[in-house]
Image (cartoon, coloured by chain):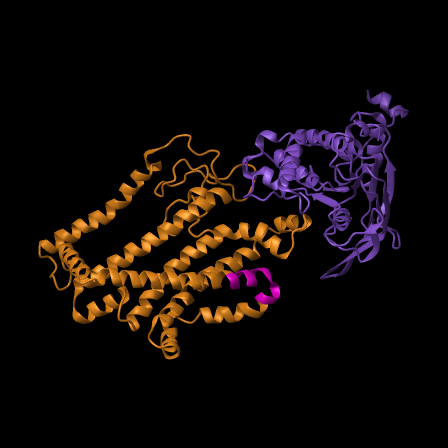
Amino acid sequence: MTIPGSLGTGPVTDDQGRVRAGLNPFSSSPAADEPDPVPGRGRTGAGVALDGGSPARGHRRPALARAWVRAALGAVLPLALLGVWHAVTTAGLVPAYQLPAPASVWTAAVDLAERGQLAQYTAISTQRVLLGFAIGGSLGLLVGALVGLSRVAGALLAPTIGAVRAVPSLAWIPLLILWMKIGEESKITLIAIGAFFPVYTTVAAALRHVDPHLVEVGRAYGLRAVSLFSRVQLPAVLPSMVSGLRLALAQSWLFLVAAELIASSMGLGFLLMDSGNNGRIDRLLLAIVLLAVLGKITDSLLGLAEKHLLRRWS
Amino acid sequence: MALTSPLASRTPGTAGAHPVALRGVGRTFPTAAGPRVVLHDVDLELTPGEIVAIIGPSGCGKSTLLRQVAGLDVPDAGEILLDGSPVAGVDTRTAVAFQEPRLLPWRTLSQNVALGLPRGTERPAGARRVAELLDLVGLSSSAGLRPRQVSGGMAQRASLARALARNPGVLLLDEPFGALDALTRLKMQDLLLEIHAAEPTTVLLVTHDVEEALYLADRVVLLTTLAAAAPGTGSVRSVIPVPGMRPRDRADHVLAELRADLLEGLGVPTHHRTPGDPDLHHSI
């Protein structure tokens, strides 16, 4: 199993640098910004590959172990940025047509909300992302399982899927529009393509690397095909699968903007493009902030699910 | 089996021990350098409830032989009969414990033991059986722990309990204590004898530890590496009955003789002197 962000002796972190509690069982602090001075800390001496979990946690609870302290610390940088932004714009260091004040962005948000567009755009974009993510993620899971479990399927499918994967996302758009017209289908299909590959890749790779000893135990205890998959192989790859899903979700937002930038009449990508064309930089900034917030929220929700799983699994 | 009979009545759920017959078993593995004969013409009969240890140098095919009885490997010559019928695929009449505990890390010890229960075991009956087995291997208080939270010896005991959960007619142990420290290994050997007394099954034990084989087994089968043997000879070099009732005295002088013989058979000089040897008196 590969864990994105795991760097040798340091604590295992996710792609945003946060320490993943389930993978750093004996780390005294689950906070990200504490370097790990002891090589191999977080492993027991028993030589088990991926030890984890709760037994040695909670000897002492430094301030950073508290959720609200971490939340407060995480808010420091955004607030500071907001402060600098405000200071720079009110002092007139940057002209308003290049960087409007935070207050004008807020006004733009209120204005759009009053027209009913803010909620509509946010909702339609979120809906597209969730639908595309669900479809692409499920297909990725299915095909990834097939390729990871069956050598024949792997030999048959992997090269083609690898080639399709190499096609840049934007290259699909004209084709999808020709095939499906400018509607929801073409956008959701594009997002599904984006969500498919991270899940497919991580699941296929993880299934190929499930400890053969455990698979043999499953077989020795009479598990076959479906029962072997559900009782041994699937639980073994679950942590990788969730990492793949998180990557897929990030990719879904990326592909959403690509889809909406090119052809749409609603949504945050449309807001971006429309505001850019009309020189409404306040709305443009609003769209960017909204994308950041929405992406972070959906990722955090999956992150919570992941944390819950890893506590049990690793 | 005078030792086992009074205790056997304690566990009415235990299936009967099965006899095992290996007839002319052979196995050849294809390698880059051409086919390599690992096992040739192995004939062996195990009586029900017997403990048989297989020892031999690395690469003599002892683990392969065990895997074949388990149905995890298929011999390309000869046949293996369990209770008179051939082993077909992974056989529910056997259960294996490996050198590594191989517990599923996401399951608790009791859930891991439950994996061994025969298909179709009813939930309450299964739970009772798991609890009984955890008690037998002394893990009752650790039932809810996960494998990473327990020591190697505890994990290995859980692995044994999982194998027993199947009520196997034949218990197959592939160097089950090989990865444990010396003291834990001695304790585990006694535990195995207790288990065998409580639930008498036929036991086939692969080990590289001559003393372990002599302490546990009714008979010791010495396998030979075929590359070193004269062409045409079988894999079984000798079958040695071990005298004495269990539990045995580890320092018994008869066992010491046998130990020396077996080690010499494995190509290890022992510098052993028999009691009648005049050198012994000089050396004291």
Judge from the rendering whether residue A228 lies leftward or rightward of residue A279; answer left or right.
right
Image coordinates of residue A133 in percent, x first then y, are 40, 61
Based on the picture, tell me whether residue B259 belongs to the magenta stretch: no
Which is nearer the eye, A304 or A47?
A304
Which is nearer the eye, B244 or B122?
B122
Based on the picture, tell me whether residue A148 belongs to the magenta stretch: yes
Residue at image x 89%, y 55%? B232
Looking at this rendering, what residue extends furthest in the bottom direction?
A: A178
Span colored in magenta: A142-154
In the image, residue A91 above or below residue A277:
above
Judge from the rendering whether residue B188 lies leftward or rightward of residue A229; answer left or right.
right
Q: Report whether residue B228 is seen.
A: no
Residue at image x 57%, y 65%? A154
Q: Report whether residue B154 is seen.
A: yes
Chain B, chosen colour in render: purple
Q: Considering the whole magenta stretch, tell me its main secondary structure.
A: helix
Judge from the rendering whether residue A157 lies leftward or rightward of residue B217; answer left or right.
left
Image coordinates of residue A192 in percent, x first then y, are 41, 66
Which is nearer the eye, A24 or A179?
A179
Image coordinates of residue B282 in percent, x first then y, are 85, 21
Would you identify the image quadrant in which residue A111 lies?
bottom left
Chain A, chosen colour in render: orange
Image coordinates of residue B133 in percent, x first then y, are 67, 34
Judge from the rendering whether residue B120 lies leftward or rightward of residue A76; answer left or right.
right
Residue at image x 14%, y 52%? A86
